[in-house]
Amino acid sequence: MKLIVLTLAALLSTAAVAAEPLKKTDGVYVDAAGMTVYTFDKDVAGSGKSACVDGCLKNWPAVAAAGELAAPWSAITRDDGSKQLAYKGKPLYLFVGDKKAGDRAGDNVKDIWHVVKD
């Protein structure tokens, strides 16, 4: 019985640490400021790499990853050593064209950028 209680306590403390890094609003994931996040079709899920580099990052900044993450969330390490949040293995980005919370101007840009849904 004592082992079960200790195991349950360990699971609960792990769950408390691994909070959801993004929230869902109107069917899509957004950051804490309500800004829509996107995936990039040129990124390969699970590769641990981002295809959006240099000039691409000026328009599509990487969403920073912090803290403990649990599936479907993970982090990749960018070439500069920073951690980028990923959803189901795909790195996540913001779009500079989105000016206020809830904007989705980046959805389907060049048919390769997409809002994140389940």
Image (cartoon, grey):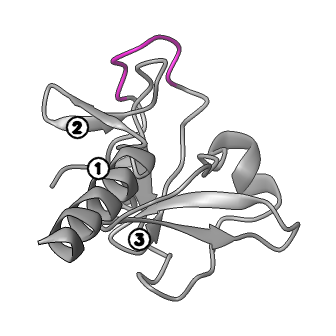
Task: Write down the residue under mark 3.
Answer: 41
Figure check: 86 above or below 26: below
Check disc 1 and give the amino acid type.
Answer: Val
The kind of secondary structure element at disc 1 is loop
Q: Nearer the viewer, residue 7 or 118?
A: 7
Q: Is residue 99 magenta?
A: yes
Seen in the image, is 84 located left or right of residue 108? right
- The local crowd at label 3, few if under 14, some if 14 to 19, many if 20 or more residues have their Cα within 10 Å, is few
Figure check: 33 above or below 73: above
Question: Where is residue 60 shown, x and y percent of the image?
Answer: 62, 46
The kind of secondary structure element at disc 3 is loop
Question: Where is residue 40 shown, x and y percent of the image?
Answer: 46, 63
Task: Please identify, in this view, whether the residue under mark 3 or under mark 1 is nearer the observer.
Answer: 1
Residue bounds of the magenta highlight: 98-104
Tell me if label 2 and label 3 are in contact, CB under 8 Å: no
Seen in the image, is 59 located left or right of residue 42? right
- The local crowd at label 2, few if under 14, some if 14 to 19, many if 20 or more residues have their Cα within 10 Å, is some
Figure check: 106 above or below 96: below
Quadrant of residue 97 within the rendered picture: top right
Distance, label 3 to label 1, CA atoms, is 12 Å
**Residue occupying the point 34% across, 63% down:** 10
Seen in the image, is 79 located left or right of residue 14? right
Check disc 2 and give the amino acid type.
Answer: Val
Distance, label 1 to label 2, CA atoms, is 6 Å
State the predominant SS element of the stretch in magenta.
Answer: loop
Which part of the image, by quadrant, shows the C terminus?
Answer: bottom left
Task: Write down the residue under mark 2.
Answer: 28
Question: Where is residue 63 shown, x and y percent of the image?
Answer: 59, 46
The kind of secondary structure element at disc 2 is strand
Task: Please identify, in this view, whether the residue under mark 2 or under mark 3 is nearer the observer.
Answer: 2
Figure check: 85 above or below 106: below
